Image (spheres, rainbow, N blue to C red):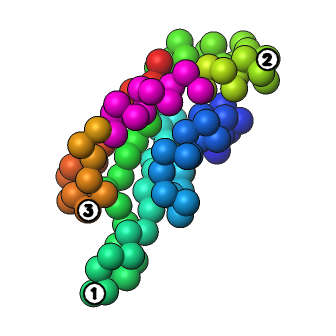
Amino acid sequence: MDEIRAEFWEALRHLFPDNAVAIALEHGDLLISWKTNDDPFRPNKRSAPIYLRFEPALLQAMRDASPRQREILAAREVDTVKAGLWGYQPDDPLHHARFIVLG
C-alpha cells in the first residue's frame, strides 16, 4: 500500500472492526474486509467487501500536501465513509459489495 492510501486507512480504520484488513488493489482501490467468525461451518468466512475508490483530484491533492495536510484531507473523508456504510451488512453475499467513492 502506498503512503497516500495508508494515510486514508489510518484515518478510517476506527470505523471497522479491529481485525479488518485493507489491501491496495492494482487499479488503486482499497479493499477492506475481515473474518466474521460467526459461522462455525465456515470459520474463515469474510465480510462482504468494501471498496474505497479515490477521485484523481483527491489523490493529486494528497500528493501535493504536507504530512499534516494529508492527515486533514484524509480525516475529511470519515463522514463520507460513514454515510457510505449506512445499511451495510457484513454477512451480505459477495455480490452486495459496497463501493464508496472518496473525493
Q: Which of the 4 quarters of the picture holds residue 6?
A: top right
Task: Kindly identify the amino acid type of the residue bearing the numbered disc 2.
Answer: Ser
Q: Position of residue 41 (x, y in %)?
A: 27, 87
Mark 2 or 3, nearer chain start:
2
Residue at label 1? 41
Mark 2 or 1, nearer chain start:
1
The range drawn in magenta is: 75-85
> Disc 3, disc 1: CB below 8 Å?
no
* Quadrant in which the N terminus is drawn: top right
Q: Position of residue 5 (x, y in %)?
A: 61, 36
Left or right, 8 with reference to 31? right
Q: CA distance from mark 2 to mark 1?
A: 48 Å
Q: Residue at x 26, y 53 (%)?
A: 89
Task: Kindly identify the amino acid type of the residue bearing the numbered disc 3.
Answer: Asp
Residue at label 3? 91
Element type where label 2 sits in the image: loop
> Disc 2, disc 1: CB below 8 Å?
no
